[in-house]
Image (tube, rainbow, N blue to C red):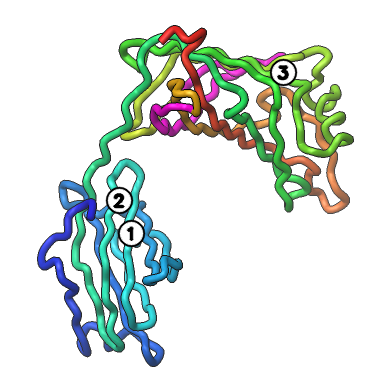
Amino acid sequence: MVGSWLGNRSNRTQRADRVAAVPMPDGAGVLSCRVLDPVNQPVPHAEFVVTDTAGRKVVGGGLDPFGSFTVTVPAGEYRLAVSAEGYAPFRANARVEENALASLGEVKLHVARPPALPRPGDWEIEPTHSTIGFTARHIGLAKVRGRFNTFAGVIRLAERAEQSAMHVVIDASSIDTNVKMRDDHLRSADFLDVDRFPTLEFYSDRFAHRGGNRWAVTGALSLHGVTRTVTLDTEYLGVGNGMEGEVRAACRASTELRRDDFTVSWQTMLARGIAVVGPSITVDLDVQIVPKGGQI
């Protein structure tokens, strides 16, 4: 078990007075828990999952503002998992009896040790195991997802990670939504205008640690002839080894762009006044990097 269980480690089952106000079907009981951080404050953004003995999810969700949850489940044996960004997970077994409250009391989450950073030096994006994708809203209903198939990037990691820098170049004509007619339109002057602006470029030398494995990478994005400041909300995933033993590091990142900020202002409205393409685009990156030229 990771995390601390405050008080008695066995289930504390209480009847009548504690559950009288909770309507329960026949054969059901109540499971509850409160989650605290290392200074005994609630962790309201934590999430919990209750599974049965076969590992199937029974119920799950977020906690209330006090860091607590109370759920009604069929009487039986369960496994509880509680997780929160920046904290080590908590796991425990629980037995819920019919018409009774099984309270795990208060559990304390411990701050997770962040994964080790890559060694300083020059790294490059490994495109085979990396993706640069985007999501746009279509006619106010469906989401259209796409990606750029051709890109390259270099990251210079400093001794102090906050002093690192990166440069990424994307081939605008490599846009791919899996529909040729739509992709041709996106390459046209109505959108990316790839004949005039063949690349998108991002440069950053502002890496800010937000705690745990979260980083903010702020830089200049040049798109459609316009340069704007953009911040990537980045989750660092750690260092590992590939199939041939090569060192790799990985991260996920996302940001939201407004089309008008980059003068990609093509606008066609449906009869009921809804834009064919939404005003904002969500960009998601899933990136692996390797030492440049095998230097590290």
| Residue 159 locus on image (x, y percent) | 32, 11
Q: Is residue 165 shown in magenta?
A: no
Residue 179, placed above or below residue 101: above
Question: At 37% across and 71% down in the image, what residue appears?
Answer: 53
Q: Earlier in the sequence, mark 3 or mark 2?
A: 2
Q: Amino acid at mark 1?
A: Ala
| Other-residue count near label 3 (Cα within 10 Å), few / some / many at <14 / 14–19 / ≥20 | some
> Can residue 54 be seen by looking at this rendering?
yes
- Count every numbered label the image shows and give the total: 3
Q: Amino acid at mark 2?
A: Pro
| SS class, disc 3 | strand
Q: Main secondary structure of the magenta part?
A: strand
Q: Which residues are magenta?
A: 217-242
Q: Earlier in the sequence, mark 3 or mark 1?
A: 1
Is 275 left or right of 106, judged from the image as shown?
A: right
Residues tagged 3 and 2 counted as in contact (Cβ below 8 A):
no
| Residue 275 locus on image (x, y percent) | 78, 44
Residues tagged 2 and 1 counted as in contact (Cβ below 8 A):
yes
Residue 140, placed above or below residue 223: below
| Residue 39 locus on image (x, y percent) | 16, 47
Q: Quadrant of the C terminus?
A: top left
- Marks 2/1: CA–CA distance: 7 Å
Is 238 left or right of 198, judged from the image as shown?
A: left
The residue that disc 1 covers is 81
Residue 85, placed above or below residue 173: below
Question: At 64% across and 33% down in the image, what residue appears?
Answer: 133
- Residue 171 is marked as 3
Q: Earlier in the sequence, mark 2 or mark 1?
A: 1
| SS class, disc 2 | loop
Q: Quadrant of residue 215?
A: top left
